[in-house]
Amino acid sequence: MKLNIIEEEPKNFIVEFIDADRGIPELVREKLAEKKDVEYAGVVKEHPEVGNPKLIIKSRRNAKQLFVKALKEVEDDIEEIISQMPKK
């Protein structure tokens, strides 16, 4: 998976997830929705069978920083799940 930054302004950030389904962008969107500084976070995909999902963030402060923080929170959640897996 690759990222394509479509728009990067202080309060607006749009990133496209290349060769990905909506799963990861939706996880990030959920984390962003919990933040008080985020005014809007949504995932769009022009067509269900073609195209790539785009995450749109509108915020009161640096949208890119909020995106990076949300990614790290998703990573922490995944690491917690992995740590609970039984060892063989």
Image (spheres, rainbow, N blue to C red):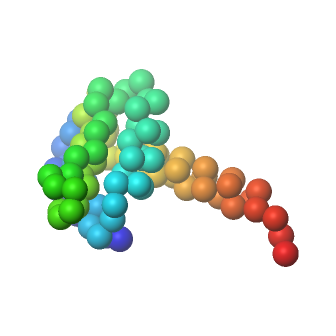
The residue at the point 28 percent across, 39 percent down is: 42
Quick check: can you spot residue 38? Answer: yes
- 79 vs 73, left or right, is right
The front one of 63 and 43 is: 43
The residue at the point 21 percent across, 52 percent down is: 45
Q: In this view, does 66 lie above or below 37?
A: below
Q: In this view, does 13 lie above or below 82?
A: above
Q: Quadrant of the C terminus?
A: bottom right
Quick check: can you spot residue 16? Answer: no
Q: Which residue lies furthest to the right in this view?
A: 88
Determine which quarter of the picture holds residue 49. bottom left
The residue at the point 69 percent across, 61 percent down is: 82
Q: Where is residue 24 in the image (x, y as percent from the top left)?
A: 42, 55
Determine which quarter of the picture holds residue 1. bottom left
The front one of 57 and 60 is: 57
Determine which quarter of the picture holds residue 60. top left
The front one of 19 and 16 is: 19
Q: Is residue 20 above or below residue 44?
A: below
